[in-house]
Amino acid sequence: MAAAGVRGQPEQADHTAYITPAQRDALSRLHERTRVPKAEHFREAVDDLLAKYDDVLKQTSAARAGMPGCKGTPARPDHDPHA
């Protein structure tokens, strides 16, 4: 759990993400319709992605814990980041 930040909100870190114009436009439409801040949608998307790859994260942590110097598990072979 993150440390408390301003007004009891979780501490947050900056990160720049590059998205396509189509993604930007869709995110803007989603924001207009839901009035949920775009940053909140990004945080939700990151949470969903981390949940999707939870097994990979656990394997990597286990490999590092059990084998000093191990780089962890390679990326999922069924995932094409350019698709």
Image: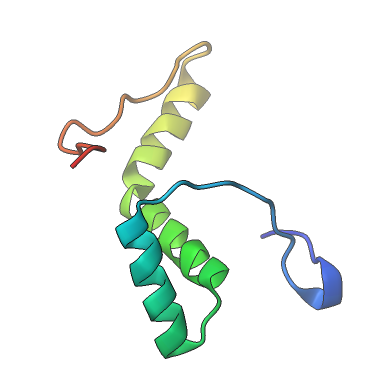
User: Which of the pair 66/73 is nearer the observer?
Assistant: 73
Position of the C terminus, as image quadrant, is top left
Q: Position of residue 36 (x, y in %)?
A: 52, 82
User: Which of the pair 9/16 is nearer the observer?
Assistant: 16
Direction from residue 77 to residue 7 in the image, left or right: right
Q: Would you identify the image quadrant in which residue 76 lies?
A: top left
- Residue drawn at (84%, 70%) of the image: 6
Q: Residue furthest left?
A: 78
**Residue 35 in the image: above or below residue 44:** below
Q: Position of residue 50 (x, y in %)?
A: 41, 52
**Residue 75 in the image: above or below residue 40:** above
- Residue drawn at (18%, 31%) of the image: 77
Q: Position of residue 19 (x, y in %)?
A: 40, 51
Label total for image:
0
**Residue 55 in the image: above or below residue 51:** above
User: Which of the pair 59/25 is nearer the observer?
Assistant: 25
- Residue drawn at (39%, 79%) of the image: 30
Q: Position of residue 7 (x, y in %)?
A: 84, 77
Direction from residue 80 to residue 26 in the image, left or right: right
